[in-house]
């Protein structure tokens, strides 16, 4: 596994008014801080990092001491992959286009929303890890055996609630890509929701996006006596078997992409209303009232643009209203949030409208398709004329599309 460390770095940035301001590395913390009154202060979200070491790991035994070392460094985080055209010590930005994804046998899993079973201690990471592995086995027994080895790390919320808060690391028999893992855990979550009648995910799939941060540092406590774990007790290793996810497991396929031309054409041709619907107002107020210290503001902004496009609200007006709000909560990041919001919203509309031949059907010669003996089924005895467009619509036996 290629795990690259990113460290805090001093840099100068520019706000939306064109004024420069300085960010000092010594003031950056890449973990949560737990105050004496129990308040949790979020990690900082710097724009730039100093590129650290890239290390390859092929076993959990090799990985464990490195995770413990990273856990004690509150000015570092890690990503899976390597940086393109950059060397150790360079100032880099953590964005997908800068990172080369690398296949790996080591799999990282984030668990956030599972209720602790009755009688299980909130600080018993070994029991929690075994419980999660058992759920993975029940949701996908062909991929996850019932005796997997793992490293379990208590996240910043571990020990304080009735939910399991874990960073879980397992080893697979073959090397897998991030896209394969994303597709796999989408399916695992689907089975989990159905089998356990819940709307919560078992696994946080956001971890499998390119350049996604692994927040590896242990939380900081203003009063260390509040820490429910000893320094050694927050990372636990349990020996066991590898998972057996096939190297040929299908990758996650991204939705239809939106071109910049299409984005500009939408802005140029659709004015939209400046009167908010009830749903639009609700989405907007969620951003306005979002607590600054909470994570997840980006997703709320993106959801706001989805609602704007669906309700035909003017996106230029939305940007005008949201800019001062987002700048106050995430200085210097508003343009990035707005660009992602409009692209995601328009991409969704395009994806819903898009029609394509399923991947598994592509490449099958039409002349070889046998429609059967029933008269209402097509039999392709000859190919369609060249340079022609043929529209086919299928029906099931009960007459439904």
Image (tube, rainbow, N blue to C red):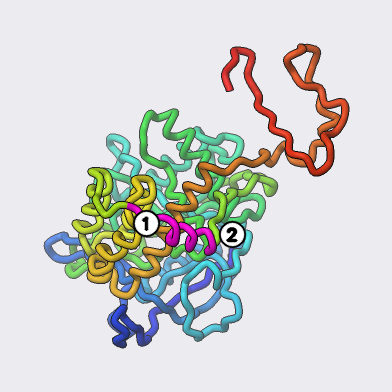
Q: Is residue 388 above or below residue 63?
A: above
Q: Is residue 9 above or below residue 62?
A: below
The one of 72 and 250 positioned closer to us in this rendering: 250
- State the CA–CA distance, disc 2 to disc 1: 56 Å
Identify the residue at image location x=58%, y=53%: 179
Is residue 249 toward the left or the right of residue 123 in the image? right
Q: Position of residue 258 (x, y in %)?
A: 53, 57
Q: Position of residue 332 (x, y in %)?
A: 32, 75
356 within the magenta span: no
**Can residue 165 be seen in the rendering of this structure?**
no
Total label count?
Answer: 2
**Can residue 140 be seen in the rendering of this structure?**
yes
- Callout in the foreground (2, 1): 1
Which circle marks residue 398 in the picture? none
Q: Position of residue 390 (x, y in %)?
A: 73, 34
Q: Which residues are magenta?
A: 260-272
Is residue 53 toward the left or the right of residue 291 in the image? right
Residue at which label 2 appears? 59
* Local secondary structure at mark 1: loop
* Local secondary structure at mark 2: loop
Q: Position of residue 165 (x, y in %)?
A: 34, 51
User: What is the chief secondary structure element of the magenta stretch?
Assistant: helix
Identify the residue at image location x=55%, y=69%: 97
Identify the residue at image location x=36%, y=36%: 199
Residue at which label 1 appears? 271
């Amino acid at each position: 596994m290629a795990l690259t460390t990113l460290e805090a770095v001093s840099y100068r940035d520019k706000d939306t008014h064109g004024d420069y301001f300085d960010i000092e590395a010594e003031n950056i913390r890449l973990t949560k801080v737990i105050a004496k009154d129990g308040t949790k202060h979020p990690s900082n979200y710097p724009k730039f990092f100093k590129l650290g070491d890239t290390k390859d790991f092929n076993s959990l035994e090799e990985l464990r001491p490195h995770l413990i070392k990273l856990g004690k460094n509150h000015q570092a985080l890690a990503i899976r992959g390597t940086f393109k055209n950059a060397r150790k010590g360079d100032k880099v930005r953590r964005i997908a286009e800068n990172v080369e994804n690398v296949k790996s046998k080591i799999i990282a899993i984030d668990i956030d929303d599972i209720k602790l079973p009755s009688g299980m201690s909130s600080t018993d990471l070994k029991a929690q890890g075994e419980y999660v592995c058992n759920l993975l086995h029940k949701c996908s027994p062909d991929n996850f055996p019932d005796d997997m080895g793992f490293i379990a790390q208590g996240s910043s919320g571990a020990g304080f609630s009735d939910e399991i808060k874990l960073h879980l690391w397992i080893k697979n028999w073959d090397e897998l890509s991030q896209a394969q893992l994303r597709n796999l855990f989408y399916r695992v979550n689907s089975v989990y929701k159905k089998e356990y009648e819940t709307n919560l995910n078992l696994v946080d799939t956001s971890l499998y996006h390119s350049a996604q941060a692994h927040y590896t540092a242990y939380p900081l406590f203003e009063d260390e006596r509040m820490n429910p774990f000893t320094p050694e007790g927050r990372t636990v290793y349990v020996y066991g078997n590898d998972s057996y996810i096939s190297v040929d497991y299908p990758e996650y396929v991204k939705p239809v992409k939106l071109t910049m031309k299409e984005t500009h054409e939408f802005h140029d041709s659709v004015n939209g209303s400046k009167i908010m619907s009830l749903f639009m107002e609700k989405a907007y107020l969620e951003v306005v009232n979002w607590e600054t210290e909470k994570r997840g503001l980006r997703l709320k902004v993106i959801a706001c643009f989805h609602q704007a496009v669906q309700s035909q609200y003017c996106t230029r007006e939305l940007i005008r209203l949201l800019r001062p709000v987002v700048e106050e909560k995430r200085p210097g990041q508003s343009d990035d949030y707005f660009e992602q919001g409009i692209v995601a919203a328009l991409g969704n509309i395009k994806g819903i409208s898009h029609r394509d031949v399923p991947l598994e059907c592509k490449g099958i010669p039409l002349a070889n398709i046998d429609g059967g003996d029933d008269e209402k089924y097509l039999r392709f005895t000859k190919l369609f004329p060249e340079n022609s467009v043929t529209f086919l619509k299928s029906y099931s036996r009960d007459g439904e599309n």
